[in-house]
Image (cartoon, rainbow, N blue to C red):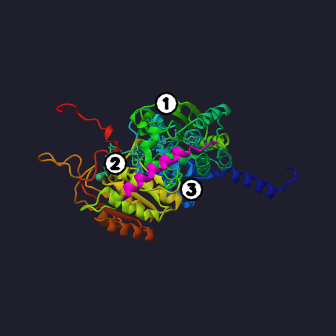
Amino acid sequence: MGSMSNNQVGAAVEELQGRATELTDGFHLLMDALELNGIKNIYGLLGIPVTEVGRMWQARGNNFFSFRNEQNAGYAASVAGYLTKKPGVCLTVSAPGFLNGLTALSNATTNCFPMILISGSSEREIVDLQQGDYEEMDQLNIARPFCKASFRINRPEDIGVAVARAVRTAVSGRPGGVYLDIPARLFAQTFSAEEGRKSVFAPIDPAPAQIPAAEAVKRAVDLIKGAKKPLILLGKGAAYAQCDNDIKALIEETGIPFTPMSMAKGLVSDTHPQCGAAARSMVLQESDVVVLVGARLNWLLAHGKGKTWGNTLKKFVQIDIQANEMDSNVPIAAPLVGDIQSCVNALRAGLKGMTKPVEWLKAVSEKASASRAKLAIKLKTPTPAMNYFNSLGAIREVLQTHPNTMLVNEGANALDNARMIIDQYLPRHRVDTGTWGVMGVGMGSAVAAAVETGERVVAISGDSAFGFSGMEIETITRYNLPVTVIIMNNGGVYRGDEPSPKHQISCMQFNPNTRYDLLMQAVGGYGVRVTTPEELTKALEESLASGRPTLIDAIIDPAAGVESGRIGNLNVVSQIGKK
Ligand code: OXK
Ligand code: ADP
Ligand code: TPW
Ligand code: MG
């Protein structure tokens, strides 16, 4: 330093001090890390200690979608994860906010959707001694059994690695939910900005391809080649995998009929000549070899056995990334563990030039065409009060001319009939109640579907289902999202005509005079009540043309529904007093 003048020394010292005082804090590091990982949208509900995150996130030019209940924000985040293959992020306050969000995190994990729930938490010293802190709760441990991993960040320098680890955990292998616990004091804790910059990163290849073993591929290929009546069964894992063209190619190259699980509808169009959706019972019962692509043999598939499967044990080829999904219910003849894209392409290579099951496909397609023709008549049959067939028939026709529309669907009869009646033409354009059959996913899913895809959204909800998340119509109108909510209003759960016991209202009924259309008007949207298929057609066409937030209250015959829709067989009923 001998050759420096006093002035130069002063400037150098000042610069060093300046660098030393350039600070960042927990708030900024968290946002830096999320942005670096490609997160643009946060769904949440603010308050102590996370309020400032929302404000600062918006100030940085990102989107914060404020909900009226964390559960709905969480459902939105999980659907964002499903649609984009990146974790959807939900932000909540401590204890009660966290718990509201946890339902959605658990649902995301159950459905294999990647999601990160970030909640602020109270002071650990106080929480751990149960001294009654503000919104005290041991969130880290409570979350653990409901998700893939539960992490807490204790130091600002760990924020980068924690977010990277949360992202990788959510999207790798079988996707699912991750909980990230951030103690209040961490947000304001300062840290060297330079060190901070070095500490945040995005993981390289967070969801690596997992190549199936050659002998596993050969086993599957041999089985499929030897089949007389093969079937490809597509699940929402296949839709999630975003290798739509490879899956379509597998189907077309082999000539094997396919049938989709509900959220896989449209992965290959419902109107594709090989689609056996309208011959579902037949294909499940009569097929001999079934190729499961991203679908679990859980309750939705009758656990792979029994009447649904023609009382015979099928030879299953199962493609799944989760090794211990194999044999979960019945023995799997040809397990194919790996990512769907790699497995499907390995099968394609092995099956090249295989003899197509022409006769079998013909039988399936004849059955499907006959079912579709039979249903078409019901969809056009007028009734004094609208039923599920003619109302959904009207919706179906309108959506035929708007194939890009995202469909959200919940309810019992409103769910099952819409799934059956409304064709899907494009991958990942249907979001519903999923693996749990959970009511209340509707409005959160609708928000995420609109935000993440930029497409028009139609949400068809039973009147009960709608009630679980109905207040979010304010969220929909606030952000001016192109969402049309159609309430299939039969005045109750399953039906609206259940007799009431003396001096009571039936436990299955709602107030039949409820004006859902006026609720929508009250929050600034367009609301209309319809009682005929013609009125429904007109209202839906207008709403799709305008793109404005709309609620159509469709009055359905209270006697039209059946208990639990198509899963009435799962109802437990008392044996006492019955013959
Ligand atoms: C399908 N079908 C058609 C068509 N599509 N016919 C004509 N045209 C078209 N386009 C036929 C199909 O072949 C079946 O008839 C029937 O319609 C029903 O089809 P689908 O696909 O809906 O099949 P099914 O048997 O109902 O499927 C089983 C299921 C599904 C369990 C996978 O029901 C499902 O995803 N359910 C979710 C239910 C749920 O979560 N509910 C939550 C609320 S209730 P056949 O003659 O071939 O059989 C609840 O929680 O409590 O009450 C509660
Ligand atoms: P559905 O309800 O439509 O039958 P499930 O949710 O039961 O579908 O099954 C989805 C399956 O897909 C899960 O077992 C999950 O592990 C699997 N999965 C998800 N993504 C991938 C992927 N990229 N590669 C392989 N399997 C996947
Ligand atoms: C979180 C149980 C299944 S379906 C349903 C309930 C309450 C409502 C059916 O009535 P809706 O549809 O929506 O009016 P419709 O057309 O048949 O009349 N709580 C949760 N999830 C579930 N599945 C339930 C309760 C249920
Ligand atoms: Mg109802």
Q: Which residue ends up furthest to the right in the rendered image? A: 3
Q: Which residue ends up furthest to the left in the rendered image? A: 502
Mark 1 vs mark 2: which is more N-terminal?
1
Q: Is residue 515 visible?
A: yes
Q: Is residue 493 magenta?
A: no
Magenta stretch: give its range: 354-376
Of badges 3 and 1, the one in the foreground is: 1
Q: Is residue 102 visible?
A: no
- Asked whether, in this view, residue 354 is left or right of residue 402, the answer is right
Of helix, strand and loop, which one carries label 1?
loop
| CA separation in Å, label 3 and label 1 | 37 Å
Pick the front one: 573 or 214:
214
Mark 2 vs mark 3: which is more N-terminal?
3
Principal secondary structure, stretch drawn in magenta:
helix
- Asked whether, in this view, residue 90 is left or right of residue 413, the answer is right
In the picture of the structure, the residue carrying the numbered disc 1 is 328
In the picture of the structure, the residue carrying the numbered disc 2 is 412
In the picture of the structure, the residue carrying the numbered disc 3 is 40
